[in-house]
Image: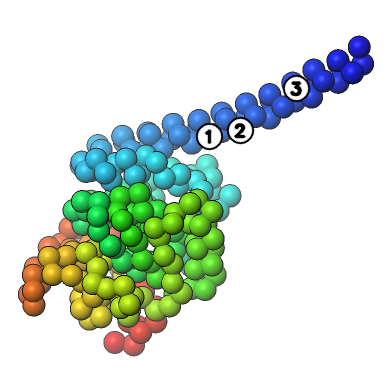
Amino acid sequence: MRIIFLLLLIASIFNVLTGSAFSGENFYDQKRREMVEKDLKARGIKDEKVINAMLKVKRHLFVDKKYLDKAYEDHPLPIGEGQTISQPYVVALMTEALSLKGDERVLEIGTGSGYQAAILGEIVKEVYTVEIRKGLYEKAKERLKNLGYSNIFVKYGDGYYGWERHSPFDAIIVTASANHIPPPLLKQLKNGGRLIIPLGSTVFYQNLTLVHKDKDTFRVKELGHVLFVPMIGEVSKR
């Protein structure tokens, strides 16, 4: 009888623990669905590929534990070293603006937590992402590897210079503000490709700027005001 009682007790504890874990995941799944409906679709995000990626990628795995309860709120969150994970709406907006089909090679400047790279990794063939801060680079690289993103390649370096070895890119996304577009990025953008960057003052608000490359000409469209942390490295010297 004592053995049976112990077995029942162990089974009960196991059910409580696993049930709690599942309910936790269910909680985050629900929050993620609410985020997509309220903060993305309701504000005009329509691309199904972007919506599906935002539904699939678990943002709470890219934030510090102390911010887990805020993981699906529509605002940036600190990730260390003075950097942030961008608000979900801006991530979706920038991704949608690139008009991705699914077979592209995309360059990201500013890996940060790896969240934007993961969103891109759910949509396109290959993602190449560059991070200038060593600590963030190491964490993001390990996180993306553990999450199984074999199509995302992370580099430690100055994003001002892009990643020439793997160029040209179908699209380039810059997740830090600059007062000019780094010329190497324009050079590494494929003809017909798109580049998106928060352009303007690195102290105040910037204009989210979409650039379409057509041979040696560039068409520019402003998508609205945003506030990003500034790029560092070579860009700050020019």
Q: Which residue is mark 2?
A: 21
| Residue ID at (35%, 69%) | 109
Q: Is residue 72 above or below residue 218?
A: above
Q: Are marks 2 and 3 in contact (CB under 8 Å)?
A: no
> What's the amino acid at mark 3?
Ala
- Residue for badge 3: 11
Q: What kind of residue is marked 1? A: Glu
Q: Determine the image quadrant of residue 185.
A: bottom left
Q: Are marks 1 and 2 in contact (CB under 8 Å)?
A: yes
* In-image side of 185 versus 73 (left or right): left
How far from the left and from the top, in percent, is residue 28? 48, 36
Q: Name the spot of residue 71 as percent of width and height, x first.
A: 47, 45
Which quarter of the rendered picture does the N terminus lie within?
A: top right
Residue in the image at 43% along x and 67% along y: 154
Give the structural element (helix, strand or loop) at label 2. helix
Query: Is 45 left or right of 175, judged from the image as shown?
Result: left
Neighbour class for label 3 at 10 Å: few (<14), some, many (≥20)?
A: few
Q: Which residue is located at x 17 percent, y 65 percent?
A: 193
How far separated are the C-alphas under marks 1 and 2?
6 Å
Q: Earlier in the sequence, mark 2 or mark 3?
A: 3
Q: Mark 1 or 3 closer to N-term?
A: 3
**Residue holding disc 1:** 25
Q: Which mark is residue 178?
A: none
* Tag in front: 2 or 3: 3
